[in-house]
Amino acid sequence: MTSRSESAPDWGNQYRLVASEKWKAKSAAMGRAVTDALVEYAQPAPGMRVIDLASGTGEPAISLASRVGEHGHVTATDLSPGLLEIADQRAQARGLKNFTTQQADAHSLPYPADSFDLATSRFGVMFFSDPVRALAELRRVLRPGARACFLAWGSFDQPYWQSMMGVVHRHVGGPLRPPDGPDPFKFAAPGSLSAVLRSAGFDAIEEEIRTLPWMWPGPVEELWEYAQSVAVPFRPMLERVPAEQWPQIHGEVHAAVRQFWDGEKVAFRVSVVMASGKK
């Protein structure tokens, strides 16, 4: 789920790539309800040509490829070739022949105008350095009447974030993330993503807040390890933690997350923004 951000963080750094490979099955399982919600919202039809921006390790692009059929096609784009390689492997494991990946910046897409019938992005639009420019560029490559559908994080003030990154922040203080860095919560305010879509030239704009399951199929300690490994926007904050404070922080995080542990999985519900517009 990467595209060029304000401070150009290394979304494809080796540590994150290793973590993405290590946890790809459980990460996909955790995001399944969110992915399914975006796919249903996008309403893919057989034969459609679809572009997915900031695809990361492949969702929702892989799920969309299963829906558009052999006469359709899905192109997954991302800045990180390493993450796209994982997406390719996942698609090949499913036997998908209508799926390709392309390293690309959302602000300058390597496609002619009127190329796609549908566009999606899951947890990517928040990280575009110039969202209006990126969405105007996306509109360019869509065919007339095509929809662009987005899913972004809601507020930081919800249990998934507060039980982990919120605990760290209470200990170390300072900025939650650099003011000029990537902001996962850029479009948490109602109407803010709609405003960007409108400025980019989209019509028939819709936006809603949904609460969806977000379940990690493993123990509490494992989820916390995963969350630290892929938390690019929060990396500067994590690096401010003095070594002697980590044992206490780990204990407090484990206790906070354990409230959502049912003996088999960690079961959160998360608030997300869904928005769409038509060319």
Image: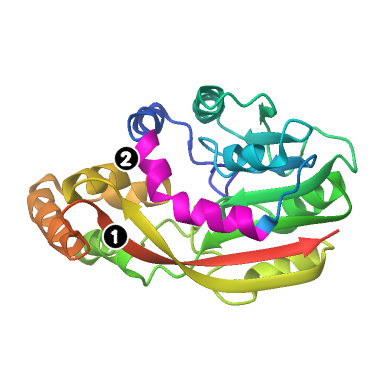
Q: Nearer the viewer, residue 96 or 243?
A: 96
- For disc 2, the marked residue is 229
| Viewport quadrant of the C terminus | bottom right
**Quadrant in which residue 17 is drawn:** top left
Amino acid type, residue under disc 1 in the picture: Ala
Give the magenta range.
24-41
Q: Could you say where residue 84 lies in the image, as x and y percent from the top left?
A: 56, 29
Q: Which mark is residue 215?
A: none
Rendered position, 61 above or below 170: above
Residue 111 can be seen in this image: yes
Looking at the image, do the residues carrying marks 1 and 2 touch, with CB atoms under 8 Å apart?
A: no
- In the displayed structure, 264 sits above or below 189; it is above
> What residue is at 90 percent from the left and 43 percent from the top?
114
Q: Give percent across and percent down for residue 2.
A: 55, 42
Q: Residue at x 23, y 59 (%)?
A: 168
Q: Is residue 123 magenta?
A: no
Residue 47, horizontal then vertical, whole percent: 80, 39
| Residue occupying the point 58% across, 23% down | 95
Q: Decide: few, some or many residues near mark 1? Use Cα within 10 Å; few <14, some 14-19, many ≥20.
A: some
Residue 72, by quadrant, is top right
Left-right relation of 16 to 6: left
Residue 37 lies in the magenta-colored region: yes
Tell me the crowding category of disc 2: few under 14, some 14 to 19, or many 20 or more residues within 10 angstroms, Cα based.
some
Q: Secondary structure at mark 2?
A: helix
Task: Give the quarter of the image for residue 98.
Answer: top right
Q: Is residue 240 above or below residue 109?
A: below
Closer to viewer: mark 1 or mark 2: 1
For disc 1, the marked residue is 267
Horizontal and vertical percent for residue 243? 12, 45
